Image (spheres, rainbow, N blue to C red):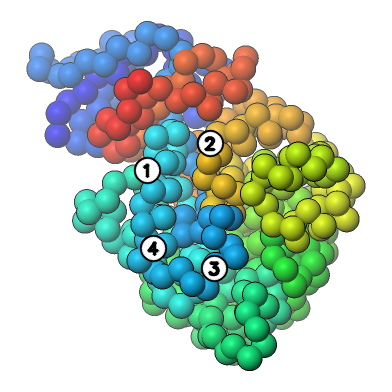
Amino acid sequence: MTTIVIVASNYWDGVADAPLGPVEILVRDGVIQEVAATVAAPPDAQRIELAEGMVMPGLIDCHVHITCRPEITANFWGMSAGYKALLSAQALNNHLMNGFTTVRDCGDMDIHGYTVRDVKMALAKGIIDGSRLIISGHMISARGGHMDATPMLSPECHSGMNCLADGPDEIRRVVREEIKWGAEWIKFAPSGGFSTPSDDPVQITYNQEEMNTLVAAAAQLGRPVSAHVMGNEGVRMVALAGARSLEHAVMAKKETYKIVEDKGAFVVPTTYAGLRSARFADDEDYWASSGMTPFAKTKVRKYRKELLDGAEYLANSNVKIAFGTDLGILSYSVNGAVEFAELVMNGITPIRALRSATSVAAELLQRDELGVIAAGKAADIIAVPGNPFADISVMEKVSFVMKAGKIYKTT
């Protein structure tokens, strides 16, 4: 690969408390070789001058659903695996062009096959291009729980789903099945949600024994666990079970977030997809343009106070926050970088928001090569046309994207 020198007028490394000023970054073979005021580059090295704005690590979105779109919810069962694979390729290109060099899919919506695994294979073979993909298999759910889609069918239809499991023995079997088919994380839904028709966000659909069994079965095979969880009691139980990543977790109390902190777990709050709707709960124009389901509107209005209170408790806690958008459940017409401004609007400091999508996200995903600009790290580098410490909205205007040393965007 060509040796590249990025010459930046200002950069941030993903860790520091403030921008670090001018720098040169030497990239070769997809890896950052040197970061210094002046690097030792060969004469034929390609030089890229990024004289305006700020250079920073490639972004990480820890919660997406590349096989889904809110626009197809009504026809969910009628979409083939091939069509969902095409949606996935589109999604990964979209993420990359917006500066997200790595994404974690948090639940394959091909509920009969393993489309996200196949998409990851296509990425590895260079058949398609896009963001680096970390996969969680399907979202394991109790029957009647958040990921049980059969209520969208007539009771006379008996269509099976490969992610439903009740009781410890069945949970162990499904966890092992997901890992067999390539899941790097195990995702499960121990509570209800907002976007689905038949469950309530504060319902707890697995007992403590079932949650403990799932986490232990995953750990035995070296997989961390991610949990879709909403209400306070569900967050508490999931944290006690040992899940590493709590998705949403937006209605917990102060004392529960302290348990999450003590356990060393991370929260991926997906605030634009959830808390924003709580602020606009009574705005019919918002709902008409949001693409969200009618079920979500009813539930958000019911739990508006708990959502807004939970956001305040999370912002005032010391819980590790990782960046996630829930795109796929949220429309892909949205640039996922809007989550930065939403985090700040909900009381998260700009530096905490920026780290959530870089060094802290890499820590959550246990990918030490990502999220930081430093020698030896993957050459995932982006630039934005301004200073996000002063104006977080510039994160929505990424002007340069490099993933693993390859340049994908220069304007």
Other residues around mark 1 within 10 Å, as few (<14) / some (14–19) / many (≥20): some
Q: What secondary structure is marked by label 4?
A: helix
Cα distance between the residues tagged 1 and 2: 12 Å
Q: Which residue is mark 3?
A: 76
Are circles 3 and 2 on residues that touch, CB within 8 Å?
A: no
Q: Which residue is mark 1?
A: 93
When asked about the image quadrant of residue 34, the answer is top left
| Above or below: residue 235 compared with residue 288 | below
Q: Quadrant of the C terminus?
A: top left
Q: Amino acid at mark 1?
A: Asn
Are circles 4 and 1 on residues that touch, CB within 8 Å?
A: no
Q: Which residue is mark 4?
A: 83
Q: Is residue 173 visible?
A: yes
Q: Earlier in the sequence, mark 1 or mark 2?
A: 1
**Where in the figure is residue 255, as x and y percent of width and height?**
86, 52
Q: Nearer the viewer, mark 1 or mark 3?
A: 3
Q: What secondary structure is marked by label 3?
A: helix
**Disc sitting over residue 253 in the figure:** none
Q: Residue at x 60, y 83 (%)?
A: 165
Q: Amino acid at mark 2?
A: Asn
Q: Is residue 191 visible?
A: no
Q: Could you say which is closer to the camera, residue 87 or residue 183?
A: 87
Image position of 185 (left or right of 157): left
